[in-house]
C-alpha cells in the first residue's frame, strides 16, 4: 500500500491553496487541543474535520474519572459535525494535533467511527513518530467493518 504526502494527492494538486488549507486545518486542531479536558493522562489532543461544504469542525479529547468513558478528539469532532450539519456530512480531510509533541494517529475506534462519514481518499494528517504524516483514510483503515446482511 502506498503512502503519499498530502501535496501529491491529485485532487489537492489542482488546488493551489491546499498546503495553506492543511496548515489551517492543523492549526484549528491545535487550537482545539488547547481546550482539552485531560486531567488524568495529560495527553491533550485536538482534531479538525474539513467538510465537503467547506466547513471546519473541531473536537478535543474529554476524559473522565471512569477512564473508559473518555472520548477522543476525533470522535468528539465527528459527533459535533453531525449535530451541527446533520447525518449527511461528508468529511474530506482530517487533521489531528496534540500539545505533547507525541505521535497521535487516530485510534482504531475513531477510524471505525469516521469510516461512515469520510471520503475514502480523504487525507488524514497527524503527528507520527518521525514527524507529520499524511495518509489516505483507506490506508489507515483498509477493512472497516460494514454490515452487509444477505
Ligand atoms: Zn480515538
Image: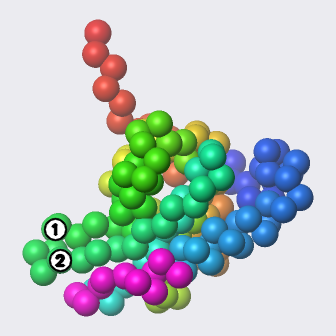
Query: Would you say 112 lies left or right of 91 here?
Result: left
Q: Quadrant of residue 86?
A: top left
> Does the stretch in magenta take in 145?
no
Tags 1 and 2 touching, CB below 8 Å: yes
Residue visible at 37% across and 82% down?
Answer: 36
- Determine if the C-beta at disc 1 is less than 8 A from ligand 1: no
Q: Main secondary structure of the magenta part?
A: loop
Density class for disc 1 (Cα within 10 Å; few <14, some 14-19, many ≥20) is few
Quadrant hosting residue 109: bottom left
Q: Quadrant of the N terminus?
A: top right
Q: Which residue is mark 2?
A: 64
For the C terminus, give its image quadrant. top left
Q: What residue span does the magenta drawing correspond to?
A: 31-40
Q: Position of residue 2 (x, y in %)?
A: 69, 48
Tag 1 secondary structure: helix
Residue 136 in sight in this render: no
Label 2 neighbour load within 10 Å: few <14, some 14-19, many 20+: some
In the rendered image, residue 7, in percent from the top left (x then y), is placed at 81, 59
- Percent x, y of residue 148: 33, 20
Number of marks drawn:
2
At x 74%, y 59%, the residue is: 6
From the image, state whether disc 1 or disc 2 is nearer to you.
2
Is residue 141 depicted above or below 79 in this figure?
Answer: above
Q: Residue furthest front?
A: 84
> Does the rendering let one see residue 67?
yes
For disc 1, the marked residue is 68
Amino acid at each position: 500500500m502506498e503512502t503519499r504526502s498530502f501535496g501529491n494527492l491529485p485532487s489537492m494538486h489542482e488546488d493551489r491553496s491546499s498546503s495553506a488549507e492543511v496548515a489551517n486545518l492543523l492549526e484549528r486542531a491545535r487550537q482545539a487541543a488547547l481546550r482539552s479536558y485531560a486531567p488524568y493522562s495529560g495527553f491533550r489532543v485536538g482534531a479538525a474535520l474539513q467538510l465537503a461544504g467547506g466547513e471546519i469542525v473541531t473536537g478535543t479529547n474529554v476524559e473522565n474519572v471512569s477512564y473508559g468513558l473518555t472520548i477522543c478528539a476525533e470522535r468528539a469532532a465527528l459527533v459535533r459535525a453531525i449535530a451541527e450539519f446533520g447525518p449527511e456530512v461528508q468529511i474530506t480531510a482530517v487533521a489531528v494535533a496534540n500539545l505533547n509533541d507525541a505521535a497521535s494517529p487516530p485510534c482504531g475506534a475513531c477510524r471505525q467511527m469516521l469510516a461512515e462519514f469520510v471520503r475514502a481518499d480523504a487525507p488524514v494528517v497527524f503527528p507520527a513518530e518521525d514527524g507529520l504524516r499524511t495518509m489516505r483514510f483507506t490506508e489507515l483503515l483498509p477493512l472497516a467493518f460494514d454490515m452487509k446482511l444477505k
